[in-house]
Image (tube, grey):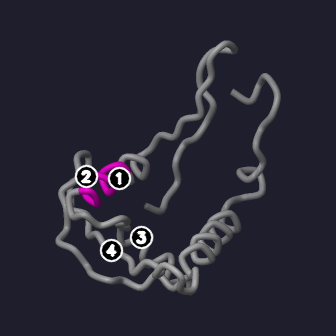
Amino acid sequence: TTGKVFCCEAGSPLRREYTLNGSHVNLAARLMQAASKYSIPVLVDRATQQGAELHACACEVDKTLEPISVKGRVEPVTIFAPRLPTPGGPRRGISASMKIQKASMAALSPDTRKRPTGPAAV
């Protein structure tokens, strides 16, 4: 999925964990469940598919699946099965994901890109 999430280290000085929260994290979990149901390795939502097309990342759609109902969302979510690179073929998927990541980082404000450090970073 594509969107903003809240991420941080949480816990005490003795035990800390890195965590992500937000509706896009929940949607990603639901897409993972749906992928196993359809026996498809990867599913993406419309925002991710369109974002990949916008940045010329070669996110070719193998098939559009029937929208799924997702807990916490009123409207069903349209899902896509992207065409994945073939073994031994060009590794477009890796460069595509790197392009998406670079485009996402470029869209963030400079303050958001800095990772806080030190005891106040919690």
Label 4 belongs to which residue? 81
| Quadrant in which the C terminus appears | top right
Q: Secondary structure at mark 2?
A: loop
Q: CB of mark 2 within 8 Å of CB of mark 4?
A: no
Mark 3 or mark 1: whose residue is earlier in sequence: 1
Circle number at residue 55: none
Circle number at residue 73: 2
- The kind of residue on which mark 2 rests is Arg
Rate crowding at label 1 as few (under 14), some (14 to 19) or many (20 or more) other CA atoms within 10 Å: many
Q: Where residue 18 sits: x, y (%)?
A: 59, 34
Indicate which label's residue lies in the foreground, 4 or 3: 4
Instruction: Give the Cα distance between marks 2 and 4.
Output: 21 Å
Q: Secondary structure at mark 1?
A: helix
Mark 4 or mark 3: whose residue is earlier in sequence: 3
Q: Residue at x 37, y 67 (%)?
A: 44
Q: CB of mark 4 within 8 Å of CB of mark 1?
A: no
- Residue 122's place in the image compared with 54, above or below, is above
Q: Residue at x 62, y 17 (%)?
A: 15
Name the dominant secondary structure of the magenta segment.
helix
Q: CB of mark 1 within 8 Å of CB of mark 2?
A: yes
Query: What is the span of residues highlighted in magenta in the rendered image?
Result: 29-36
Mark 2 or mark 3: whose residue is earlier in sequence: 3
Number of numbered discs on residues: 4
Q: CB of mark 4 within 8 Å of CB of mark 3?
A: no
- The kind of residue on which mark 1 rests is Leu
Q: Is residue 97 visible?
A: yes
Indicate which label's residue lies in the foreground, 4 or 1: 4
Instruction: Give the Cα distance between marks 4 and 3.
Output: 13 Å
